[in-house]
Each structure stands twice: as structure tokens, then as C-alpha cells.
Image (cartoon, grey):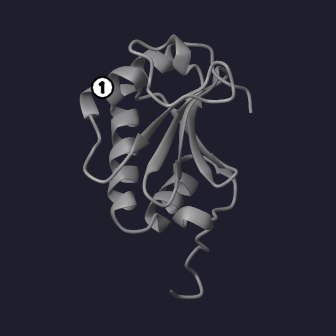
Amino acid sequence: MTKADPVLLSGGNPQIAKGHGDAPVQAYIDAMPGWKQDIGRRLDALIVAAVPEVQKAVKWNTPFYGLDGEGWFVAFHCFTHYVKVTFFQGVSLTPVPPGKSKQANVRYLDVREGALDEAQFTDWVKQASRLPGEKL
């Protein structure tokens, strides 16, 4: 690790300064460890392909995706054995993503190495982008 490399927090989550735009999100993805970096790149590419006008930011060491003036609809975060995708209005998606949350509307998708269903993920992203976003 060089002096310029971001610190990896618990679970290998990169510590990236908060900021808006593609650059901080790409810095986060570049710092994701091992196979998680490939997942991060794929998630980012699928989100941009599904919602070309998407806005990006890093907050709380997590990439967020949303629409200008509409709030955030999806985010992801590194954990030790998976990348956790957060759908802020996940209970309104069909089918509902499998991971439950203490927050009533939120649902999660835990993406493990080699286990991303790109078609289902893309469909959820498109659905999520049409719902009211979170104002964080």
C-alpha cells in the first residue's frame, strides 16, 4: 500500500472523502479490494446503462446513485464476504430484493463473488429510479 492509497475500513470498505460526481465514486471503486472491485465496476456500469442521467456521490464511504432533485435510489458498500446493495425503496420493487432492513422501505441485495444476476439487478435499478428517492 502506498501513501496515497485509501484506508480500508472494516470489511475492506474504502475510506473515501465525500464528494459529488463520478470522480469520488471511481476513487471508491478503484480502492475496493480484490474481486469486490470487479463487482463495483459492474454495478456502476449497469446503473449508468439503466439510468443514463444518474447523479453520483460518495457519502459515508458509500457510493450513492440518484436523480437530480429526486434523491438517491441505490447505493453499495463493501463487507468482508460480499458487496451490499441498498435499494432505498426496495419494498416497492418487484420482486422485492431478499435482504430485509430495520428501515421499513429499505431492502438489500448481498452480492457475493461471481453471483450477480445482472438482468434482475438492472430491472431493480430501473424500477428504483422511478420511485421517490431518499434525501440524504
Q: Is residue 8 above or below residue 76?
A: below
Q: Residue at x 70, y 51 (%)?
A: 60
Residue at which label 1 appears: 120
Quick one: 105 or 43, which is closer to the camera?
105
In the current view of this chain or complex, which residue is farthest to the right? 136
Q: Residue at x 69, y 54 (%)?
A: 18
Numbered label tally: 1
Q: How crowded is mark 1: few (under 14 residues within 10 Å), some or many (20 or more)?
A: few
Quick one: 22 or 84, which is closer to the camera?
84
Give amino acid for label 1: Gln
Left or right of residue 80: residue 49? left
Q: Which residue is drawn at 30% across and 25% down?
A: 120
Q: Position of residue 3 (x, y in %)?
A: 59, 87
**Quarter of the image holding residue 48?**
top left
Left or right of residue 2: residue 17? right
The C terminus sits in image quarter: top right
- Residue 14 seen from this side: no
Q: Residue at x 68, y 25 (%)?
A: 134
Q: Where is residue 123 in the image (x, y as percent from the top left)?
A: 34, 21
**Quarter of the image holding residue 17?**
bottom right
Q: In this view, does 29 lie above or below 22?
A: below
Q: In this view, does 5 lie above or below 94?
A: below
Q: Position of residue 49 (x, y in %)?
A: 33, 32
- Residue 5 seen from this side: yes
Quick one: 70 or 75, which is closer to the camera?
75
Q: Is residue 107 above or below residue 6?
A: above
Is disc 1 placed on a helix, strand or loop?
helix
Q: Position of residue 28 (x, y in %)?
A: 53, 59
